[in-house]
Amino acid sequence: MQYLFDENGRRYLDAFGGIATVCCGHCHPHVVDAIVNQTKRLQHSTILYLNHAIADLAEALANKLSGNLKVVFFTNSGTEANELAIMMARLYTGCHDIISLRNAYHGNAAGTMGATAQSNWKFNVIQSGVHHAINPDPYRGVFGSEGEKYAKDIQDLIQFGTSGNIAGFISEAIQGVGGIIELAPGYLPAAYNIIKKAGGLCIADEVQGGFGRTGSHFWGFENHGVVPDIVTMAKGIGNGIPLGAVITTPEIAEVLTRRNYFNTFGGNPVCTAAGLAVLNVIEKEKLQDNAFVVGSYLKERLIALKDKHDLIGDVRGRGLMLGVELVTDHELKTPAKLETLHLLDQMKEIGVLVGKGGFYGNVFRITPPLCFTTEDADFLVDVMDYAMSKM
């Protein structure tokens, strides 16, 4: 569930969840049984042959989205899902230009590396047709929490960096790799409006923020009151099984009929059986509600810890997708890189695993399995408090 054990049998509280991937819990019996039973029945067939596991998961996912988002393409990862989404946007609009946000992470293949906007994750290869807008970062951004002011940069990019028409816009609602940065309020509605006027499609990257992790809603974009044209997902969809998906409208999906599109392992019956089991567990065990309750409690405790330790510059996020940014100077917001590494190691020694993110590597990424309890939250914060007190 929310614990991991090393080769000597020592237990660790997992507050990272395999990078926001293990949502139901490690070795959840319902998910494990679904995988084992499907493997015994049929391990692989490709989508050339109809299989209930594929169709049932596609239907269940489509039912989790509103409007006309009801065509599902399965992939093996978030990178693959975002690659496919970007290609579909370009085919549908007949335009090449994509806009993403600075500090974003969308994958490490040709197109997605272009959409990714951190030099730490970009190799020196050709990455064409992507423009990176100013990040609506409430903590470090020039306009603070005034989302609509950041959106003007998208208009400028379209007017001065493209032909005036674009293929699309891709963004996370909460930047995961970027350091758990929740986009400033009002930003996404304003951005979507500008994008649509330029003929572009809006792509919501729900690879880390989806499947109830934010607590208040099932999808991260719902917190902003917008409806995307394409939704991508992975990680939590399979609780650790390699599985991703792209969901869009029938009109947009039609572009893939212009040529042969195929993914050998996308929609694999074992993976899709696991995906359906994950959705059942989230609903049956009310994991989204738990993410809201426990996440809210955990955030309150972390905010209280911020008042105690000057090293904590910011506490942010929603549900069980939380970030703690460490700085050595509150005025200059100087990243506490070495201190972050030291604390990560100290907390691991005591028995707590947390992630590290942000461009400067100074943000604790707290994305545990959604079965996390208030007792787990207390232990996590107490360990963090103890480790900081020993600095």
Image (cartoon, helix red, strand yellow):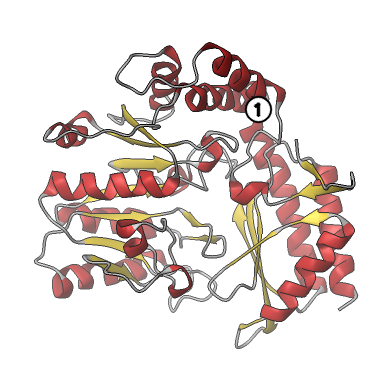
Type of the residue with mark 1: Lys
Q: Nearer the viewer, residue 285 or 303?
A: 285
Q: Position of residue 154 (x, y in %)?
A: 26, 67
Give the crowd class for mark 1: few <14, some 14-19, many >=20 residues within 10 Å.
some
Q: Position of residue 29 (x, y in %)?
A: 71, 23
Q: Considering only vertical position in the picture, is 338 above or below 89?
A: below
Which residue lies at the image location 75% right of the left edge and 61% below the top edge?
Answer: 302
Q: Position of residue 280 (x, y in %)?
A: 58, 21
The answer to which image quadrant residue 304 occupies is: bottom right
Q: Considering only vertical position in the picture, is 255 above or below 303?
A: above
Q: Considering only vertical position in the picture, is 268 above or below 112?
A: above
118 vs 336, left or right, is left
Is residue 106 in view?
yes
257 vs 24, left or right, is left
166 vs 106, left or right, is left
User: Image quadrant for the N terminus?
Assistant: top right
Is residue 320 in view?
no
Count up the numbered dots: 1
Q: Nearer the viewer, residue 79 or 69?
A: 79
Q: Position of residue 19 (x, y in %)?
A: 60, 51
Label 1 element class: loop
User: Image quadrant for the C terminus?
Assistant: bottom right
The answer to which image quadrant residue 155 occupies is: bottom left
The answer to which image quadrant residue 278 occupies is: top right
From the image, tell me which residue sits under label 1.
286
